[in-house]
Amino acid sequence: MTVESPDSIPDGALVVDAQRGRRDAREELARRYRRPAFLFAYQLLGNRDDALDVAQDAMLKFFSSLERFESHRPVQPWLFRIVRNRAVDVVRRQKIRRAGSLDDPERAHEPAARPEASPELQAQKRQLQAKVWEAIHRLPEKQREILVLRDYQDLAYAEISTVLGIPKGTVMSRLHGARKALRTAVAGLLGGKDG
C-alpha cells in the first residue's frame, strides 16, 4: 500500500474530505493557501500587520463557509474573493479612522535581485521595484487589485472575474486601463523617464 503525498492530493478531494470533517484535509488546505492569502492581502494593503489580520480572518471565513463550496471549483479564486472583501473592509475603516492613504514606507513586496547580479544592478532593481509598488499603491483600489491579481498572483481572466464579481470583458478593459495608469504613475515617479 502506498501512502499518497499531501501535495499530490487535488484541492477538490481535500475540500470534500474537509467537508466530511477530516482534520488533516483542513490542515492541508490551510497549509496550501495561508501564504497566498497573506501575500495577496499584503499586495493590496502594503502593511504586514493588516495583511496578517486579513489573511487570518479570510482563512477563518473560508473554513466556516466550506460546506457551501462546490468541490469542482478552484479554491484560490474563491479564497481571494474573501481576502479582497476583508481588505476592502480594512481600507474603509482606515479611511474613516484617519482619512489616510495606503502608503506605507515598509514595502518589501518583491524578492531581492538574483545573487549573481552586481550590487549596483541589485540596488537599481530594488529602487525600481520600490517605485513600481509606490505607484501601484497610489492607484485607485479597483486598478490596484486587478493589477495584483493578474500580474502578481497570475490569475486567469476568468478567475479574476470570479474574485471581483465582474464580467470577463470588464476584467480585460479594467486591466488595460490599470496598466496604462501604472505606466504613467511610474514615469512620473521616475521624473518623466519612460521605461
Image (spheres, helix red, strand yellow):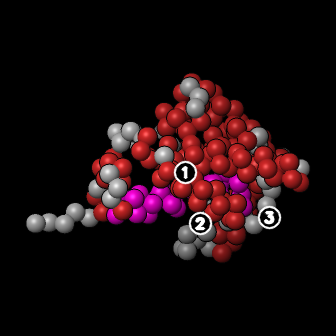
Q: CA distance from mark 3 to mark 1?
A: 30 Å
Q: Which element is circle 1 on?
A: helix
The residue tagged 1 is: 61
| Labelled disc at residue 105 | 3
**For marks 2 and 1 on the same chain, the one whose residue lies earlier in the sequence:** 1
Three-letter code for the amino acid on which mark 3 is drawn:
Pro
Q: Residue at x 59, y 49 (%)?
A: 83
Which residues, given as a range, are shown in magenta?
24-47
Q: Residue furthest left?
A: 1
| Discs 3, 1 touching: Cβ within 8 Å | no
Q: Residue at x 29, y 56 (%)?
A: 9
Q: Position of residue 99 (x, y in %)?
A: 89, 50
Up/down of 168 relative to 67, above or below: above
Residue 1 visible in the snapshot = yes
Three-letter code for the amino acid on which mark 1 is drawn:
Lys
Q: Position of residue 179 (x, y in %)?
A: 67, 38
**For marks 2 and 3 on the same chain, the one whose residue lies earlier in the sequence:** 3
Q: Is residue 193 magenta?
A: no
Q: Residues within 10 Å of mark 2 (few under 14, many from 20)?
A: few
Q: Position of residue 113 (x, y in %)?
A: 60, 68
Residue 126 visible in the snapshot = no
Q: Residue furthest right?
A: 99
Nearest the viewer among 188 and 55 is 55
| Magenta-drawn stretch, dominant element (helix, strand or loop) | helix
